[in-house]
Image (tube, grey):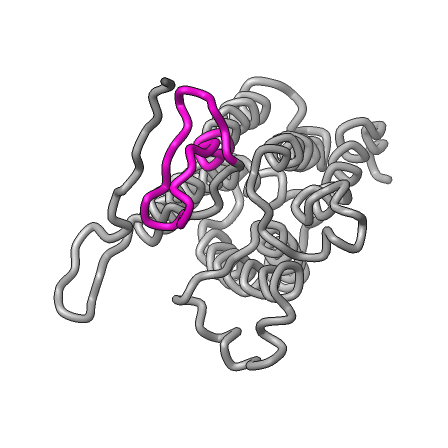
Amino acid sequence: MLLHITWNVSPEIIEIGSFSLRWYGLLFAAGFLTGLFIVRRMVLAEGAPEAWLDKAFIYIVIGAVVGARLGHVFFYDWEYYSKDPLKILKVWEGGLASHGGAIGIILMLWLFSVRVSKKSILWILDKVVVPTALAGCFIRLGNLMNSEIYGKAADVPWAFIFVRSDPNALPRHPVQLYESLSYLVSFFILYYTYWKTDKKDKPGFVFGLFLLLIWGFRFVWEYVKESQGGFETAFGNALSTGQLLSIPFLLIGAYFVFRKKPEAGS
């Protein structure tokens, strides 16, 4: 008989009356604050105004939260929310999609570039994506603490039984850990590329590499992830919604990584 890990961890760290501090919220905040510290170092190293950083942080938070929420609503559960649109505002009930968050952040950073930095959006994207990979690592650990977004049934010895959320109590792939470790590896690759190579001098390269790493890993792990719903049925379930949404990001990433470096003054 194979050994499995019984996962019955409370998602709450502490509860006082109606207030509760949850692991997910703590890890989510830790990802943003760590990212702020890392990007600050990058921005100051180039002599840019530190005030830009505070403004960029606000743009990113808004883009991430609004984008992730709307991504979940429209990509995964529109049938449910269309019946009661006011539920879209109840973010605390759960329901965030990373693809939507990515789109939201990119759109808000474009607005930041137009209104604040007056630089190409690639200038800020090449910096922000480095700690974003680390934030993704933290967020997937938060999903683990919530016993959500787990994998398909598996007979591997490291399978988790998610007591709190799986009514069938089946041993499953701990895909949250697979993704979290993948994003951690991506962070180290991106961090090394930015600081130890000359690739940051090629606008968009680090951004493109981020897209290839993060969404490449996401595409692979979707094969062992339990379906999250969405519009995959329209394609005969050949690919999951997460995989279908990852393809455009992978194509954009490949473009920026393999394109020729723009000529000076072009």
Name the residue rendered at 63%, 77% in the picture.
82
Percent of width and height locating residue 12 = 24, 53
Compared with residue 108, is residue 41 higher up or lower down, i.e. above or below?
Answer: above
Compared with residue 173, is residue 235 higher up or lower down, i.e. above or below?
Answer: below
Compared with residue 50, is residue 177 higher up or lower down, i.e. above or below?
Answer: above
Percent of width and height locating residue 204 = 71, 37
Q: How many marks?
A: 0
Name the residue rendered at 55%, 22% in the picture.
189
Q: Is residue 59 left or right of residue 261?
A: left
Name the residue rendered at 38%, 19% in the picture.
2
Q: Is residue 218 left or right of residue 40?
A: right
Percent of width and height locating residue 45 = 49, 34
What are the residue bounds of the magenta stretch?
Answer: 153-179
Percent of width and height locating residue 250 = 74, 37
Compared with residue 22, is residue 190 higher up or lower down, i.e. above or below?
Answer: above
Q: Is residue 42 left or right of residue 83?
A: left
Question: Overall secondary structure of the magenta stretch?
Answer: loop
Viewport quadrant of the C terminus: top right
Work out whether residue 53 can be spotted: yes
Work out whether residue 44 can be spotted: no
Viewport quadrant of the N terminus: top left
Tell whether position 171 is magenta. yes
Name the residue rendered at 54%, 63% in the picture.
69
Picture quadrant where residue 83 is located: bottom right
